[in-house]
Every structure is written in C-alpha cells, then in structure tokens.
Amino acid sequence: MMKRLPLCLTVVFLLIFTISAHSADIYVSPAGADNQDGTISRPLATVNAALRMAREWRRLNDPRIQGGIRIVVKGGNYFLNEPVFIRPEDTGTADSPTTIEAAPGETPVISGGRNITGWKKAGSVPGLPAAAKGKVWVADVPLDGGRPAEFRQLWINGQKAVRARDRNADSMSRILSWNKADQTCRIPWPAIKGLTNAPSLEMVIHQWWAIAILRVKEIRVQGDSAQLFFHQPESRIQSEHPWPAPWISKETGNSAFFLANAVQLLDQPGEWFLDIGAAKVYYWPRNGEDLSAASVIAPYHETLLRLEGTIDHPVKYVNIKGLRFQHTGWLRPSRQGHVPHQAGLYMLDAYKLKVPGTPDKKSLENQAWVGRPAAAVDIRFAHNIGIENCLFEHLASTALDFGKGTQQSMIRGNLFDDIGGTAILAGVFSEEPVEVHLPYDPTDQREWCRAIEITNNLITNATNEDWGCVGIGAGFVRDILIAHNELAELSYTGISVGWGWTRTLNVMRNNRILSNKIHHYGKHMYDVAAIYTLSAQPGSVISGNYIDSIYEAPYAHLPDHWFYLYTDEGSSFFNVKDNWTPAEKYLQNANGPGNIWTNNGPAVKDSIRQQAGLEPAYRHLLEGRKTADKNWPINQEKK
C-alpha cells in the first residue's frame, strides 16, 4: 500500500485543488470572438484572451475574483496561432485559484496542428518508386510566415502515418562499420534508384539505450556498400561521444539502422514524404482512406501551453482540467540532428577524456552537456499547479514537462497516448552549461523541483519516435511521489528517477515510487528496466510495484541485458521492497552505500499486484489503452 500523506499536507492539497462554487466564470468557444465579454452567451474565442481578461481582474482586484476564476472552455477544436502562455501576473491564491477547464460533458481540443486540404492524385513525381505510381496523393504545404511549413509527423484520421523509409514495419539493416576519425559510416547499399540524390535523407541508428537521428550530407557508393557523411553538429558529436556509441560485434551483430525521408523510399500504403523545397506533401493512402474527405493534420507548434514564472515571481495556484492536447511537432532532428545521451536528453557536446577524472569522479572517462526536448505543456518556476483529467495524444516529443522551480503540484488522472517522446518529465536534468556527471545541489531552494505528485495516470504507446525516451522521467527531484500509474507499450524504460551518475549527496531526497503497474516495455531498446535509478537519493523508496512482460528488442546488442529493477551508477540509500516481478532479474550497477533490498520477486503476495496500478476511480482510463502486440515475443528469464 502507498503511504498516506500527513494530514497537514492533505489539507494543503485540498485547498490547492478545490474550486469555490462562487468563482467568476469566463467562457471560451470556437464560435466566440475575442472582442466579446466572455459570458456564456458572448464567449471569447481563445484561452489567451480569457487569461488576459482574468489578469486584468486580478490587477484591479475586481470583487469577482474572491472565489477564484474559472475559464470554461467549450468543446471543439482550437488550432493555435501561438501557445497559451500563463505568466506570474496570472497567479492565483489558495482562496482564489485560476482554473482552466472543459465545459461539463464537452471535449475542447488544444491543437498545434493545421489541416492539410486540397489532396489530389499525384501525376509524374521524379524519384517515386514504380510500385507507388498512380497510388500516391499530393497536397500543397501551407505557408508559415511566407515559407513552407516544416513538419516530421502527419496524422490521417487520428492515426500517425509513417515517414517513408527503406525497411518497412520493424525491420532494420545493420551497419558495416563506423569510422570515428572521418565521422562516416559504411552500410550495405539498398540499390534504390536515385537515392544518392535525396537532400533530406536521414539515418536512424540503434545504439544500446538510445537512437541517433543523423542528416545525411553525402553518399559515396562503392559496389554493394556505401559510405555516408553527415551534417554538423551531429556528425562530430556522434563520432566523438563514447556512450552510447555505434556497436560493432561479430557475435551479436552491428548496430541496426534504417534510412528515412526520401521520395525514393515511399513504397507502401501509410507512408508519406514532405518535399520542403517544392512545398508538396505526398501520401500513399491505406485501405479505406479517402483523402478527399479525410482529416489530415500536420503539426505547426512544438509547445501548446507555457506556464512559466521566475525564481522571484513563480506562477501559483493554477489548475488545468479536462482539456485535450494534440498535434505537436519535433523539429530539432531536421535542423541539428539528434544524438541523445539518455532518456531523450540530446547532447550539445560530448567527448572522451584523454586524461580521465573530474573533481567528483576520479575515474570518469567522458564528459557531456545536454539539452532538453520541447514539450507540449511546459511548466517552470510554478507552485501549486494541478493537471487533472486531461488527454495528451498525437504529440511528437515530451507531452508534459515540470521543469526547474516547480513545487507542491499534482499530475493526476490523465491519459497519455501516441507520444513520440517521454510522457511526463520532471526536475532538472543538468542545465545546458553544466556537465551531466556533476551533482546538483543549489543553495537557493526556490530552484528545487520538489513535492510533485504523479498519480493515477495511464501512459500507453509513448516513446514511439525517440525510442530512448521513458514513460516517466524525473531528474534531480526531491519529495516526489510517483504512485498508482499504469505504463505500457514503451520502447525503453518505464520510470526513471535520478540523474548525475554520482554517489555525492545532492538535492535528491525522499522520492517514492509506489504501487505502479509497468508492463510491455523495452520494445526496441535494451539496458532497460521497468524502474531505473541514478545517484544518491537518501530516504527514497521503491515499493509495491507490479512489473511484467518485457518485450524482446529485436536488435539488442546484448540480448540478455534487460531487467525488472535497475539501480544504476551511484544509486544510494534506496529501500527496495515488496515489488512483484516474474523473476528476480535485477541489476545493481556501481551502486553507492545504503541500499536495502527486501522481499522482491514472484513470491510477493498477490495483493501487491491487485493494488498496483490505477485506483478504482481512475480505471475508466483503461478504455483508452493500446492493446499489447501479441505477435511480439516477451523476454523470459533463462533457467
């Protein structure tokens, strides 16, 4: 059973998330207009306009705000011209919070996408495979600021299409070699006509616990193989960083890869290609799809909602309830490549040290600096924030990010489905100027990410673009509670808590991972676990979790390197107890002191399994769960 909050904290959270029946209401509707008064009969058209109205009420201390402000969003689609932006001036109080919520029984959709219309059968398309001729449709790409909009995702009637690639379904090829000195890779050449003249071609390569996305600059074909050169900066970073790097092995096979994003690769239904130079998008419809009547949406924005204060003026007492967030993009790979360090944090610089050792770690042989991926909902320097009963879907990168300075807040009862990256990210993950192996322990407590409750959320079909992301990722966090969530259909790890790879005491304390249900994960990557930790975290507990069914990753370099629980480098002072797993397949790698393991494995009583995952009031979310792939094998512990 998860631990109960102390009575004083329970009262605080009730005050934070309870809205007075006498709150002032501002209405928003797709049929409204921003020059109206925001009443139910004359609603506004945008949430930003409603926030401006509420902001003025607070500035003028209007009597209507005494019971709080409620922005009621009517059902329908809200295609954003700019993100919703909640500022310090929008701050509420415990007695007068601001709530943005769906109208009763209605479904407002906050979308970062645009409809693509005007589809017609394509005529002659240079480079199109013979099998696709007469079957592909084409539409003009809408302009964004006078230029063709760039995007990496396309949804047809709510289903994500596949960027044209050389190996279909889940099939991949294997590299022949990697030359770090000249930053090139040699691959078997697919002999696809015209592929050497594909200016937007990308290589996606599988590397241990992460993938890299590399823009191909030049191809030199030599017989049945080819040498690939890549654009900067990813070319340098990919060849200089040691972890994770391309794998070369006669025993288990070299790193797997596929090529993507060329019209020459558009060879089956469900695939598409964006010709950014010609401002055209091509798509081969699946059976039953009629593009003349279909909803075709491409993402235009990477962020839908920003809730951001400052260290001196955090945003406080704001609740988001019942909204649906859809259609965000992820453009960094198209512009700078994507070479991650871990959990989707991309490397800005990384290299092996000629002389090992840093002040914190005498044996460290590499350094890295990372950036943070874009998020659909991005929250920083904010207190007493509630995200409840929302739906996050069709998002290309991180769905929800509680970053630096977020405190005393809650993420509860939400559904995350079709997420390209991590579903929920929280805490600091080494700010860009700071090397990743250094402990984070700021003296100013206002920087801390602390007292965040992540409870009763369903995460399914996440990490489906950046396979190295995780279901829930928490970096340097304190007093965080991750409890009664269900996570499934993940390419890599379920819950990851910690950062820094260090035994040195830091800001992390008293983190609790309790009664979660994690299953059907590790579909593409390895060096994987349902629950994974890093670094010293005194007073932290992993207990009562139910873990099952790790997919067999088809291109794992070390096929047996999968785990149910994994305390990695520097993990210290954890109490790991009463977790049900099918076998005692755990890894304790380079751990620090103070870890206690008690009563974990298949002998744990059945009540642990029965109580883990969503609590009864939230099990309706399971209606949105993606079913497991019955044709994909499950790892079994060898006897």
Image (spheres, rainbow, N blue to C red):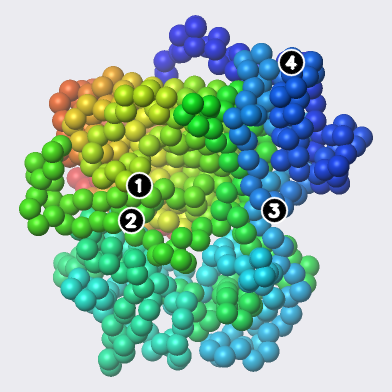
- State left or right for residue 459 relative to residue 83: left
Question: Residue 510 vs residue 570: left or right?
Answer: right
Foreground residue among 153 and 606: 153
- The Cα–Cα distance between marks 2 and 3, rounded to whole angstroms, is 30 Å
Residue under the point 74% across and 15% down? 67
> Disc 3 marks which residue?
81
Label 3 to label 1: alpha-carbon separation: 29 Å
Q: Position of residue 393 (x, y in %)?
A: 59, 48
At a point 90% along the width and 37% down the height, the residue shown is: 42
Q: CA distance from mark 1 to mark 2?
A: 8 Å
Q: Nearer the viewer, mark 4 or mark 1?
A: 1
State which tag comes first along the sequence, 3 or 1. 3
As displayed, is residue 409 above or below residue 184?
A: above
Give the class, few, some or many, for how many residues have Cα within 10 Å of label 1's Cα (few <14, many ≥20).
some
Label 1, secondary structure: give it. Answer: loop
Residue that mark 4 sits on: 67
Spatial CA distance of label 2 from label 4 is 47 Å
Q: Nearer the viewer, residue 257 or 41?
A: 41
Residue 410 in the image: x percent, y percent?
53, 26
Mark positioned earlier in the residue sequence (4 or 3): 4
Looking at the image, do the residues carrying marks 1 and 2 touch, with CB atoms under 8 Å apart? yes
Amino acid marked by disc 1: Glu
Residue 432 is labelled as 1
Residue 453, image x, y percentages: 48, 25
